[in-house]
Image (spheres, helix red, strand yellow):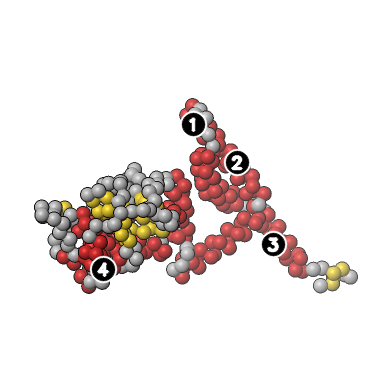
């Protein structure tokens, strides 16, 4: 546009006015910056706290000063990038509104991810790193495999009933739906199981469908039913043989998967049962994590009844 012989670029003026308006300090700017500061400072403080040597000052003053230092440093950075941050937050909120409305990744998912991240950083499970190698032959292997009737309609229907009864309304964590459903099976079986010894003259191996009649039997009967029901709904179980004992485990996946499962067990699914307790698991020779599902456990990953491993039977 030409005015009085002078050319004026309207686009440049418009953009300049827009950026100038963003630079004008608004009351809500400080609120947004402060909230972002806290959200960033907490995980950074956890990392610093776990990796820096504690000075053991009175009233933990060294950690208080550390947190304040992190707050001040983040505040300075955020103020320097105020305009860019405000624009990015506005766009991000729009995306989250769309995700919430469409049933995809929305506000609730962000909260769950942030909460899970903080919990995982501050309370990782302690490993039981027993690598399975050079194991002895599994006792009664052929009989046990035949007894794990995961394709039997009674077993399948029982597993489906358990998933409808427990943890049906857990939202989010779609990648862990099968594991959550297997935990529902664990809850149903272990809440009803009655330990009954075998006859004196030898091992009695009950089929999975037979155990559904009374939810009674010894450790191998429990393991067979648990493995069958877990596999019937897509989980991957295995049986561990120790001296005088057999118990089931479930494949969780990687150590990253274990972090999420740890959070789910202790904060969503088995909060009371696992309060102030750790998860017990094994890592096999391929780096895969297996979680304990023994009949003595009140939550997935409960304490092992016996540590010594003599054999393993995996059911893929």
**x and y percent of residue 289 in the render?**
39, 55
Q: Are marks 3 and 4 in contact (CB under 8 Å)?
A: no
Give the CA separation, mark 2 to mark 3: 29 Å
Which of label 2 and label 1 is nearer to you?
1
Q: Are marks 2 and 3 in contact (CB under 8 Å)?
A: no
Residue 145 shows up from this direction: yes
Residue occupied by mark 3? 18
**x and y percent of residue 67 in the render?**
54, 39
Which of label 3 and label 4 is nearer to you?
4
Where the C terminus falls, by quadrant?
Answer: bottom left
Residue occupied by mark 4? 150
At horizontal 53% and vertical 40% (from top left) the residue drawn is 51
Q: Are marks 4 and 1 in contact (CB under 8 Å)?
A: no
Precedes in sequence: disc 3 or disc 1: 3
**x and y percent of residue 311 in the render?**
30, 54
Which of label 4 and label 1 is nearer to you?
4
**x and y percent of residue 78 in the render?**
62, 49
Give the CA separation, mark 2 to mark 1: 19 Å
Query: Dot 2: few (<14), some (14–19), or many (≥20) neighbours within 10 Å?
Result: few
Precedes in sequence: disc 2 or disc 3: 3
Residue 72 sits above or below residue 187 on the image? above
At horizontal 47% and vertical 47% (from top left) the residue drawn is 121
Which of label 3 and label 1 is nearer to you?
1
Residue occupied by mark 1? 60
Which of label 2 and label 3 is nearer to you?
2
Residue occupied by mark 2? 72
Where the N terminus falls, by quadrant?
Answer: bottom right
């Amino acid at each position: 546009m030409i005015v009085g012989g002078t050319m004026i670029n309207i686009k440049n003026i418009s953009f300049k006015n827009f950026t100038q308006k963003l630079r004008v300090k608004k009351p809500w700017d400080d609120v947004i910056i402060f909230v972002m500061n806290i959200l960033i400072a907490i995980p950074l403080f956890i990392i610093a706290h776990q990796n820096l040597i504690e000075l053991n000052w009175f009233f933990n003053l060294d950690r208080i000063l550390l947190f304040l230092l992190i707050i001040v440093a983040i505040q300075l950075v955020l103020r320097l990038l105020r305009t860019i941050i405000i624009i990015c937050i506005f766009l991000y909120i729009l995306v989250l509104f769309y995700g919430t409305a469409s049933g995809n990744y929305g506000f609730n998912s962000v909260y769950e991810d942030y909460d899970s991240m903080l919990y995982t950083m501050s309370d990782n499970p302690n490993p039981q790193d027993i690598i399975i190698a050079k194991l002895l032959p599994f006792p009664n292997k052929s009989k046990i495999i035949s007894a794990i009737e995961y394709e039997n309609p009674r077993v399948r229907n029982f597993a489906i009933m358990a998933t409808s009864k427990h943890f049906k309304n857990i939202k989010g964590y779609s990648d862990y739906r099968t594991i959550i459903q297997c935990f529902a099976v664990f809850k149903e079986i272990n809440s009803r199981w009655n330990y009954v010894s075998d006859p004196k003259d030898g091992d009695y191996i009950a089929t999975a469908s037979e155990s559904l009649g009374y939810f009674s039997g010894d450790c191998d009967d429990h393991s067979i039913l648990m493995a069958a029901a877990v596999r019937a709904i897509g989980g991957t179980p295995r049986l561990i043989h120790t001296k005088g004992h057999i118990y089931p485990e479930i494949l969780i996946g990687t150590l990253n998967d274990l972090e999420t499962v740890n959070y789910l067990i202790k904060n969503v699914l088995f909060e009371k049962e696992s309060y102030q307790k750790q998860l017990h698991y094994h890592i096999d020779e391929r780096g895969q994590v297996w979680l304990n599902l023994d009949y003595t456990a009140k939550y997935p990953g409960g304490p092992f009844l016996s540590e010594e491993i003599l054999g393993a039977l995996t059911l893929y």
